[in-house]
Image (cartoon, rainbow, N blue to C red):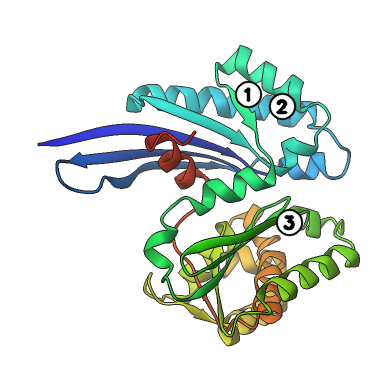
């Protein structure tokens, strides 16, 4: 007997907003299967507002309300039994975030929760990482967003430590990450990985997923430091227009992908990692799993 349940996750990021609708397939005696039914990504760059002027602009509030109305209708059509909507870095920093949340509840009937970096990292880490993490190895999990980057260290199958830094792609695009932040990240990574002989990176986020897709590798295979470094040089050699026309990148991906690649490269360099695995996971996947298992 097979039972299919539908859950939805809304991820309101600094570079884009996503609605993930997932089918959870339940079968007696087997682990539940999580299958993506639909994924809608809307390029509303909230970080551009929040990080430069400190508030979400009236134009983007209107766009958010429209997107949320659409998300609500899609969830209705899919007959979703439960959803959760989480907002991250940009909404954390916008001083009018509470008003925006209240307006969206009133106009689109969607309740949004603004979460901190620690909760964000914990939700992402609660996804399918246990399939990837070998109990006798050490991993640095790096999730690069538009506003912040979350680092989580795993060793012997356990989470050792986690930290969120205000170094995201939209901030870097606007020259808003000071050298002191890079120094802090370098110090944190070196200090926390010093006791381990070998560290492997796990990368999460839309940009590393795109880089991985461009590599043509099979899902379980890692990317090497040499490959990521050469891709960084290649992307830098192209203009913004060429990245869109020749590589087929979205306009809101073509300008931030270089900054994201730089973060992953630095994390590899400072931890001594030679490889980076790119599982298909993100905040949306984590929300669905955490909801299903009753963690949130």
- Numbered badge on residue 274: none
Give the quadrant of the N terminus.
top left
Quadrant assignment, res 119: top right
Q: Is residue 77 left or right of residue 104?
A: left
Identify the residue under disc 3.
168
Quadrant assignment, res 254: bottom right
Residue at image position (76%, 68%) is 188
Which is in the foreground here, disc 3 or disc 2?
3
> Is the residue under label 2 in contact with that under label 1 (CB below 8 Å)?
yes
Ranked by sequence position, the earlier of labels 3 and 2 is: 2
Ranked by sequence position, the earlier of labels 3 and 1 is: 1
* Tag 3 secondary structure: loop
Q: Is residue 249 visible?
A: no
220 or 227, which lies in front? 220
* Tag 2 secondary structure: helix
Q: Is residue 92 visible?
A: yes
- Numbered badge on residue 65: 1
> Which residue is the extreme one toward the left?
1
Identify the residue under disc 2.
61
Quadrant assignment, res 135: bottom left
Q: Is residue 39 left or right of residue 241?
A: left
> Is the residue under label 2 in contact with that under label 3 (CB below 8 Å)?
no
Spatial CA distance of label 3 from label 1 is 24 Å
């Amino acid at each position: 007997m097979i039972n299919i349940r539908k859950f939805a996750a809304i991820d309101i990021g600094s570079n884009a907003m996503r609605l993930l609708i997932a089918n959870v397939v339940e079968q007696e005696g087997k682990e539940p299967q999580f299958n993506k039914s639909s994924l809608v990504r809307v390029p509303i760059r909230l970080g551009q507002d929040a990080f430069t002027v400190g508030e979400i602009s009236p134009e983007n509030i209107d766009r958010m309300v429209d997107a949320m109305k659409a998300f609500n209708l899609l969830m209705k059509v899919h007959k979703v039994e439960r959803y959760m909507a989480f907002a991250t870095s940009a909404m954390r920093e916008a001083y009018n975030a509470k008003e925006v949340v209240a307006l969206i509840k009133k106009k689109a009937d969607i309740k949004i929760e603004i979460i901190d970096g620690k909760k964000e990292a914990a939700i992402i880490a609660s996804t399918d990482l246990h399939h990837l993490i070998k109990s006798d190895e050490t991993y640095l999990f790096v999730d690069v967003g538009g506003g912040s980057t979350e680092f989580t260290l795993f060793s012997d199958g356990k989470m050792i430590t986690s930290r969120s830094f205000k170094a995201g792609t939209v901030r870097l695009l606007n020259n808003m990450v000071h050298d002191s932040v890079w120094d802090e990240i370098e110090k944190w990574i070196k200090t926390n990985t010093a006791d381990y002989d070998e560290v492997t990176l796990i990368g999460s986020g839309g940009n590393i997923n795109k880089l991985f897709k461009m590599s043509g590798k099979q899902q379980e295979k890692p990317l090497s430091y040499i490959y990521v470094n050469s891709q960084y040089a290649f992307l830098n050699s192209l203009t913004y227009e060429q990245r869109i026309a020749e590589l087929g990148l979205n306009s809101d991906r073509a300008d931030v992908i270089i900054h994201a690649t730089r973060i992953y490269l630095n994390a590899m360099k400072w931890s001594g990692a030679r490889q980076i695995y790119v599982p298909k996971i993100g905040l949306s996947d984590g929300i669905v799993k955490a909801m299903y298992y009753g963690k949130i």
